[in-house]
Amino acid sequence: MNIKKLTACLITLLCFKAIKAQQKDSSKLLKEVIVTGYQTVNGVGHLLEMKDGIIYAGKKNEIIVVDSLDANKAINNTRQILGRIPGLNIVETESSGFTANGIATRGLNPTQSIEMNTRQNGYNISADVYGYNEAYYIPPMEAVKRIEMVRGASSLQFGAQFGGLVNYVTADAPKDKPFQFITSQTLGSFGMYNFFNSIGGNYKKISYYGFIQYKSMDGYRPNSQQWQLSGFGKIQYTASPKLNMGIEYSLLRNKIHMPGGLSDSLYNANPKISIRARNWLKSPWNIISTYINFNPNDHTIFSLKTTYIFSNRSLVWRNEDGGGNVLDDIDPATNQYVPREVESENMHSIASEARISTNYTLGKNKSTIAGGIRLTYAWFKRLEGGEGTTNSDFDLSITGEWEKNLDFTTTNIAPFVENIFRIGKRFTITPGIRFEYLKSTANGYVIDDRYEITTNKSKNRYFFLSGIGMEYKSKYNSSIYGNISQAYRPIDYNQLQPFGVTSKIDPNLKDAYGYNADLGYRTTIKNYLNVDISLFYLAYNNRIGEVIKTDPTTGLDYGYRTNIAGSVHKGLEAYVEFNILKYLNQKSKHGLSIFNSFAYINAKYTSGEFKGNRVEAAAKEIERAGIIYDSKGFSSTFQVNYVGDAFGDATNTKVSGNPIAGYIPAYTVLDFSATYKINNYSIKCGINNLGDKAYFTRRTDEYPGPGIIAAVGRSLYIGFTAKF
């Protein structure tokens, strides 16, 4: 049956059941109960209008309770953990240099989550929100208790990103226990081994929690070996019910062997091959965050977080010269390999974010105002083009000098405020505004064709972001919501100085700007139905991207990074989950749920040379559907993942000699996971990519390529967890 028709029928049927159930329950209304957390069915739900002093009223948002999911958490399988969020585009590659391969919404660029505001426990964990907004680190999913996501309307409370917010909330110390120990061991295909240990507890006014994770694997393709060590520690002092403070430290250490990219012909012949054996990467990450929370009364919440990130990304590789067809062979003239290229980036950033919210009476109704200020400074050191060794091991030493030696800085000051105006008991209007001051500098030199070009640039920007949200709540647990909010994306370091040499850059690049809008309906009925259906419209002006041009001298294609044009992304996002057994019998000890996460995304350029072309990497249809069975001690999930086709660049070229250009075919992947629990012990197992589908989601002209980066084929895993 056609996927669109099946989705439409399912949505219509379940919405009809929701309305009938609401009518049936109308005679059983109880007095008002104020819920301050979140509501979920089978671990998927949405945030309420206020949480921890942050306004979510009128915003499109989702929450995932990770512990309730059957998923391969040992390898952070994103499509199983976050896949129920409609329209989520996921980069699914192996050995790409960081824990999370990247996500995006609404047809935006998913590479390293560059369009998202990525946070852990409420603070940013990417290198530089505006200058280098790439996520090399996220916490292991075994340590995450929930994931919060807000679409583009998050730009007022969190920052100007088009894609919105994703916040990974780690586990807390167990309540009323002085000590708790959890250990988890997982084995899987391709030599995968993962262990995760955590401790936590409370002693008088002090609570603590920490974990350590180690993971190693041989990899799906040759030359894909990697290991990773993640750690986290948190200590909190609760002085009184109104005041607590604490400190957190996160770390990542890794070493990754990158198998390189493939041309279309090589991939079609054998997607598992590797023609690069000498590419290595490491990305040590360090984050220190301190916080204080103070609630002077029942109506006011104050928080202050200060975060310092000091991290690095270094690699040695046979670079992208020649594209994905060039073999890395021994030169018969020298009887050695060609020298590799060494790159290194050091990242330092410090950010403080203060927030305050308070309730006040306006007329007969309670209103809420929430605001704050964010102060950040980031320094980024980029060293590129160092001539490395002719060896094959992980050696970052160079001979001579760097071809690029650049220092970038970003200074950002951003006050913001939003206000919930309540009109009666059911309708809210939430206007907001954010002011951004942004200063960027670039200093250093670039050696190009034996000429040294020095750089000394500085740019100041001042801009306002505004928006408004509205929400109407019925007598029942449902609401109609809508919002429109401005967004902004300044030129980042990669766009000023692209990584690698196959791309050229437009010297007259401009910042991108636009807005997001949503209109939707959501409802949660008891423990058997969860529905969230919405329309969206995203306008993206001065969009920066890659186009393919031909060098008139050599006749070779090359990538050109420029403001391509304006684009519009519009479509439908729908999530429906229905627990059949709970609907038939509320007291049933068994559950049988079906869920469908569907998005239709029409993302096209609306002006310029490529007017009418599809935006690169934007699939038209993304659907993830599944069946969940759970009973006392046992649960299992079977999930079907369908992602439509896309293109690698704005020209919508199907075949090209350039690694970034070309067709990205649609694919369907099947996953199965199960968990069995006995008291404090559990066994988990599953099969990812059950049908062993060969597919890819990414083309790249830089590391870990160049060329097509294949996704992982069929893999199995089994694990054991114990809690003491």
Image (tube, rainbow, N blue to C red):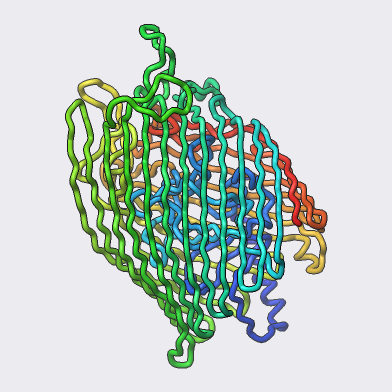
Q: Residue at x 45, y 64 (%)?
A: 518
Q: Residue at x 52, y 53 (%)?
A: 250
Q: Position of residue 288 (x, y in %)?
A: 47, 57
Q: Position of residue 57 (x, y in %)?
A: 49, 72
Along the line of sight, the residue nearer the viewer: 327 or 409: 409
Q: Residue at x 65, y 66 (%)?
A: 16
Q: Residue at x 61, y 56 (%)?
A: 210
User: In which image quadrant can residue 590 be found?
Assistant: bottom right
Vertical placement of residue 145 versus 624, above or below: below
Q: Position of residue 467 (x, y in %)?
A: 37, 69
Vertical placement of residue 208 versus 217, above or below: below
Q: Is residue 605 left or right of residue 441?
A: right
Q: Position of residue 468 (x, y in %)?
A: 39, 72
Q: Is residue 475 left or right of residue 424?
A: right
Residue at far top of view:
333
Along the line of sight, the residue nearer the viewer: 586 or 22: 586
Please indicate, yes or no, whether residue 2 appears anywhere in the rendered image.
no
Please indicate, yes or no, whether residue 388 appears anywhere in the rendered image.
yes
Along the line of sight, the residue nearer the viewer: 380 or 71: 380
Vertical placement of residue 238 versus 400, above or below: below
